[in-house]
Amino acid sequence: MSKSSKKSTTKGKGTKAKATASKAKAPKASGKVSQLDAAVQVLKTKGEAMNCKAMVDAMLEKGLWKTGGKTPAATLYSAILREITTKGSEARFKKTDRGQFTLK
């Protein structure tokens, strides 16, 4: 009996992952800039490697992006690493040093 319950759990995880991936590719119609897109703009303007805290401060100062979160720098760091891991050579970012990122 326990084997059948494990099979249904595995099937559920596979379908959820596929549904999430397709949602992430959909373009936003609201006109809001994502945190990663704002980070790209900040890095283009600066022209050198920056840490996530400095990027978030610049985004908020310029009004490129708004947040109500407690740790936006940690969220940005995680999102950048996730893009580098998933997209590989197609990623917009490159890690230059510990906590430092630049554009490719």
Image (cartoon, rainbow, N blue to C red):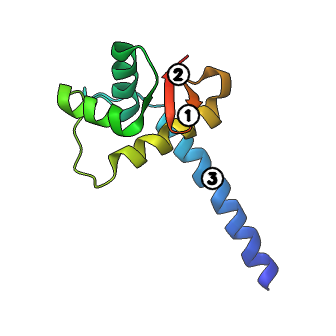
Disc 1 or 3, which lies upstream in sequence? 3
Marks 2 and 1, how far apart at CA: 8 Å
Q: Residue at x 37, y 27 (%)?
A: 39
Pointers 2 and 1 in contact (C-beta within 8 Å): yes
Of residues 50 and 20, the one drawn nearer to the viewer in this rendering: 50
Marks 1 and 3, how far apart at CA: 22 Å
Write down the residue under mark 3: 15
Is residue 64 left or right of 52 when viewed as pictured? left
Q: Residue 18 appears at what percent x and percent y?
A: 61, 45
Q: Residue at x 53, y 22 (%)?
A: 92
* Residue 15, placed above or below residue 12: above
Which three-letter amino acid code belongs to the residue tagged 1? Glu
Marks 2 and 3, how far apart at CA: 28 Å
Q: Quadrant of residue 10?
A: bottom right
Write down the residue under mark 1: 83
Of residues 44 and 69, the one drawn nearer to the viewer in this rendering: 44
Secondary structure beneath label 2: loop
Q: Residue at x 50, y 29 (%)?
A: 101
Write down the residue under mark 2: 92
Disc 2 or 3, which lies upstream in sequence? 3
Secondary structure beneath label 3: helix
Q: Residue 42 appears at what percent x and percent y?
A: 34, 22
Pointers 1 and 3 in contact (C-beta within 8 Å): no
Q: Residue at x 28, y 55 (%)?
A: 70
Is residue 10 left or right of 103 when viewed as pictured? right
Q: Quadrant of residue 57?
A: top left
| Front position among marks 1 and 3 | 1
Which three-letter amino acid code belongs to the residue tagged 3? Thr
Pointers 2 and 3 in contact (C-beta within 8 Å): no
